[in-house]
Image: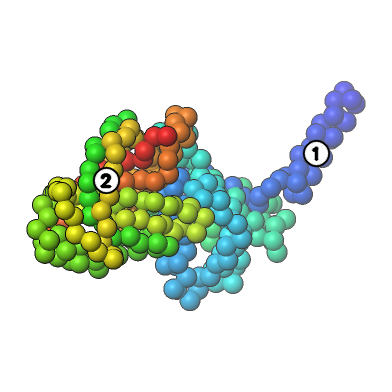
Amino acid sequence: MKNLKYIIVIVLSFVFIWYFFIKQYDYLISFKIKTSPGNLYTNLLDFNLVKSQIDSFAYVLNEKMPFSRINEDITVHDITINYDWKFNSINDSIVMVKVGLIEDENSFYNRLTAPFATTPFKKTALNIIKDFKNGIDYQLKNKIKVKISGIDTIPTITYAYLNFENIKMEEKAIEMMKNNSMLLMFIKEHNLKKGDFPFVIINNWNREDGTINFRYCFPIVTRDSMPNDNVIKFDTIQSMAAIRAIYNGNYKTSDRGWFALYEYSKRHNMSVDLKPIEFFKNNPQNGGNELEWVADIYMPLK
């Protein structure tokens, strides 16, 4: 009996030391959501920027690993908490989000009270995470949809194109709209027969800083004599195998299709070339419900 008491005391002592002095976080929150890690990662960066326009909110990024982790300090009303966000796929459509929370100044007190009481630390942390999750839920219900359709073939296409380099991913659609009339005017002036839908070829995708090099293209019918121009060039896509996704939503956020394809390729051990190709099936100038806009997005297989 005496030995049993000693064992219980030792075990409780180890638990006490681990919980208050070794455990990584003061508090850990987790939830599941039906999207891709890349979408969550990108939306969190956007969330920070939007929130930082409010006087009571400030943040400092400490570390980020594209599509999997963001570590940051967020200050709200003089309470500074370290948020360690981690995004891990558990299947092709569900992501587990874990957020580890630490308030250095009150760590011992928070660990003591977090399981039982709603302290300012816990309330502030829960509100931030809830705001972020509510925004994601709204986006997935009202703004975007992505469906992986599997392996497909990109056809051979000859096209006229404009080249863009070192463009922020969120500015891709702006560059397309600004230069659309130039490309169409060139095609018309030279009596080139064009196809129905413009498309984009990503030549380089820098996931660390969120920039891309890309071509904005219109398919054309080739002929014996092609016009020469210093800005607008011609090229041909050769037929190739690729994973295909169907994206619905504003073309400003069509990169959500890239994220889904990238994650799908990792989960299924598929070797891909991270140079997505997007075919746009709607004209944004016609307006309408953005969820009815369609883009076919391909990630070429190596």
Judging from the image, what secondary structure is the residue with disc 1 in? helix
Judging from the image, what secondary structure is the residue with disc 2 in? strand
Left/right of residue 158 with respect to residue 126 in the rendered view: left
Residue 165 x/y as whole percent: 40, 62
Residue at 28% over, 32% down: 152
* In the image, farthest residue toward the front: 224
Can residue 177 be spotted in the picture?
no
Residue position for label 2: 236
The label nearer to you, 1 versus 2, is: 2
For the residues labelled 1 and 2, the Cα–Cα distance comes to: 66 Å
Q: Indicate the amino acid at tag 1.
A: Phe
Residue position for label 1: 14
Left/right of residue 38 with respect to residue 145 in the rendered view: right
Residues packed near mark 2 inside 10 Å, few (<14), some (14 to 19) or many (20 plus): few
Q: Indicate the amino acid at tag 2.
A: Thr
* In the image, farthest residue toward the right: 2
User: Looking at the image, which is closer to me, 292 or 129?
Assistant: 292
Can residue 100 be spotted in the picture?
yes
User: Looking at the image, which is closer to me, 196 or 121?
Assistant: 196
Residue at 39% over, 51% down: 203
Residue 105 x/y as whole percent: 70, 64
